Amino acid sequence: ESKEQHHSVTRYKESNNKYSVVRLSLMTELKQAIEEGQLTLNYQPKIDVASGKVVSVESLVRWKHPEHGFIFPDEFIPLAEQTGNIRHLTHWAIETALQEHVRLREIGFDIKMAVNISAVDVSDLELPPFVSNLLEKYSVAPSSLILEVTESAIMSDPDKAMLALNMLKNMSIKLSIDDFGTGYSSMEQLKRAPVDELKIDKSFVLDLATNKDDLIIVKSITSLAHNLGMTIVAEGVEDNGSLTALRKLNVETAQGYFISRPVEAHILESWLQDNNG
Ligand code: C2E
Ligand code: CA
Ligand code: CA
Ligand code: CA
């Protein structure tokens, strides 16, 4: 199992606060970083709980900074949203992930590719045509692309979000509500949202095997989703106990360190060849 490097970012975090010079310069560096190829995507598989087969992979961005080492997305996505660089980052991420999808298909793994989009993107009416052009450019079926959008992103401007989500849905792109259970989505919004799956936040999944409250919550979310015609992905599966519990609850899809950490493309490719043959 390959571990991601966390030490350099820790050092960076320790010497940093909200208004530090480092943080301010990162904001101006980000656009250039994309152009210079400092951003990269790692990929984490999601498996079908019943069969153990990989059904999709989620792309997760990392910034390999020449001075600060690896910077994780929680550090720079909020900055990118504030400075307006997020659209550039999202466009880059979708194109890079689709290229990797094509590569995986070429080596025999026709699995869905998931990309995270931010609150800014979800009310951007130019995103659907942008995605449409890329799908055509790379000859990728829209149903092979999953866009993961957080509950709170939808709630920040529900009417506009519903408009953009419906455009994407009408193109047959798969939509997933991320971090489900941590935001304030009303049942009304959930009913309106044209989404295919709910991703249960890892805070409810990490201790699933031992925590009765978590078990009740996951069970309830699962039955709600199934009754609304949606499927469930559980993230943060770190042990076999959680995976067994998910199987009993008829959760469709699982993702987490127990299955694989997010890894570089070439590691994913050999991992798939070893585990999904
Ligand atoms: P997320 O979409 O909820 O992604 C799940 C996070 O949990 C990832 O952190 C992943 O590495 C981590 N994780 C996966 N399995 C486990 C596990 O078993 N246990 C634990 N404790 N953690 C696990 P990461 O990669 O640092 O990403 C953090 C967040 O940054 C993501 O949360 C997502 O909201 C955002 N993000 C990542 N990539 C992108 C991107 O390309 N675009 C946008 N807009 N946001 C991104
Ligand atoms: Ca996600
Ligand atoms: Ca999540
Ligand atoms: Ca998250």
Image: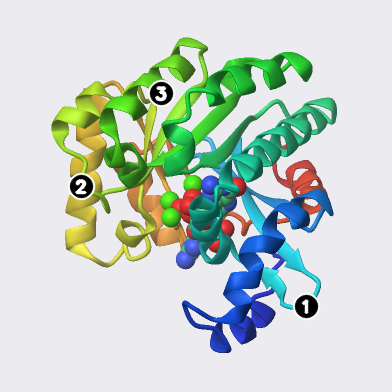
Circle 3 crowding by C-alpha within 10 Å: few under 14, some 14–19, many from 20: many
| Front residue (pair 87, 115) | 87
Q: Note whether 140 is above or below 146 in the view shown.
A: above
| Front residue (pair 229, 85) | 85
Proximity of marks 1 and 2: CB atoms separated by less than 8 Å: no
Residue lying at the far top in this picture: please name it.
170
User: What secondary structure is found at the residue carrying circle 1?
Assistant: loop
The answer to whether residue 152 shows anywhere in this view is yes
Residue to which mark 1 is pinned:
67
Proximity of marks 1 and 3: CB atoms separated by less than 8 Å: no
Proximity of marks 2 and 3: CB atoms separated by less than 8 Å: no
Residue 38 position within the rendered picture, expressed as x and y whole percent measured from the top left: 79, 58
User: What secondary structure is found at the residue carrying circle 3?
Assistant: helix
Residue to which mark 2 is pinned:
184
Circle 1 crowding by C-alpha within 10 Å: few under 14, some 14–19, many from 20: few
Q: Note whether 273 is above or below 215 in the view shown.
A: above
Residue 176 position within the rendered picture, expressed as x and y whole percent measured from the top left: 42, 33
Residue to which mark 3 is pinned:
165
| Front residue (pair 246, 159) | 159
